[in-house]
Amino acid sequence: MKRVLKTLSVASLFTFVSFVSAAVQAQQVPEVNYDLPTAEEVQAAKDSRRSYTVSDRTGRRILAAFELFEEDDIQGAIAELSDFSPSSDFDRAYVNRYLGTFLANEDRTDEALELVTEAADLDVLSHSDQTATLRLAADLNLQAENYAEAIRYYARLLQFSGEHDANVYLRIANAYYELEAFDKIIRPADLAIEHFEEPNKNPYVLKVASYYEREMFGEAVKTLESGLAVLPAESDWWIQLGNFYMLEERIDKALETMEIAYLAGYFESENHYRALVQMYANNEIPFKAGRTMARYIESGDVELTEINARAAASNFDAAREFDSAAQWYGIAAEQADSDTQKADRYRRQGVAYLRIQDYDNAVEAFERSVALDDEDAGSIFMSIAEAHYYSGRYREALAAAQRATDYPSQRRSARSWVGYIRATAERKGISI
């Protein structure tokens, strides 16, 4: 359903859809004069505005329509005025304004818009009625996605009323966003921020969108920082701010901000946890990266996939937490789609087990790897030989080293190992 103001989400800051070509946009994007008339000038315009009185015939029809409207018979109210053709411009504007309002209540926007804009353009209603009609014409144009026309009517409203209206400024900024006139968003958004009695997040969101589209990341950061100063509970903004710090390569600030969001309980999606993991890794804190990924895979907040399990494993590996690395490399292997991936993850698992001298599990992991992929089998047989050797199983170590000699890339070192294993076994009086 169409809405007058489209509230932007976090995702929408980074995923924009283009509706208007640059050429069309250049032709139709209107300007707005934000220098409003003074209160004295507005009063003078009111005093000089000609007054009209609705005719008795028109008054009776309007009264009858309102009685039906108050009884929730909106269709009856519409029918009462639809077949009525007033003779004077004032009566026509008066009827069109109210008939347009009734139609808008029934979501008959196109019909309402035609009548309301005609009433506004006749410019004969009283000052208060004309103000309301201009506002309605602007809102209906925005609802109908006639963004340029909406801006024109809002601009007329501002100059006619002389009132700083935060919602009008916000709607202008929103219309400029829809027209992709991103540079024109800032002034009305700032005016909206200035004139809202209570802080409102939407002008900040529109400003961030404007700066993001123009790759002005520093200005986007300043906007989010100022927004969080008055709306600190906007959880999405902490995460966006962290991402913008990353774009500016302010890695320490990015991590600090994401940790604030994390500790405050603002994370709502897997991407938030993944971003924090990446920031820990970028800041050379691999243990926290691995622990965070593992914890939230186990809790179900992050999906168990090969990529996520491997991220936990590689960060534990970098932190020299080889026991945990081995565990998560095994989990990554179970989630992998191809034999090549599985083989690599089991090989890495075996290396991790070797580093903590868990030779039995290392051999098992290496054998799983070599069974899945023969491409790197020579080096894997060498690793198997090493694991058997250090566990004192010289016969098995010799067999693995001899198998490694079948692979040209490992042949020279494998032959050396064969000799070394034989010599060690002979020195220890072990027959192999």
Image (cartoon, rainbow, N blue to C red):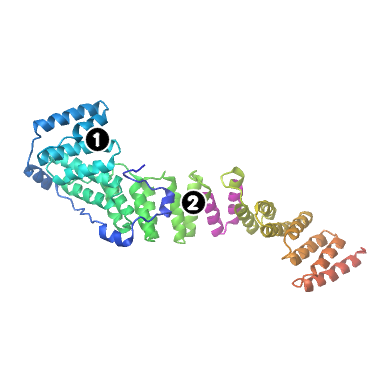
Residue 327 location in percent, x, y?
A: 69, 51
| Residue beneath disc 1 | 102
* Label 1 with label 2: CB-CB less than 8 Å: no
Labels 1, 2: front one: 1
Amino acid type of the residue that numbered disc 2 sits on in the rendered structure: Met
| Residue beneath disc 2 | 258
- The answer to whether residue 332 shows anywhere in this view is yes
Counting other residues with Cα less than 10 Å from the Cα at mark 1, is it few (<14), some (14-19), or many (20 or more)? many
Residue 218 location in percent, x, y?
A: 39, 59
Numbered range of the magenta stretch: 272-295
Give the answer, above or below, for where 421 lies relative to 264: below
- The answer to whether residue 237 shows anywhere in this view is no
- Residue furthest to the bottom in view is 412
Give the side of residue 287 with respect to residue 157, left or right: right
Amino acid type of the residue that numbered disc 1 sits on in the rendered structure: Phe
Query: Tag 1's secondary structure?
Result: helix
- Residue furthest to the front in view is 83
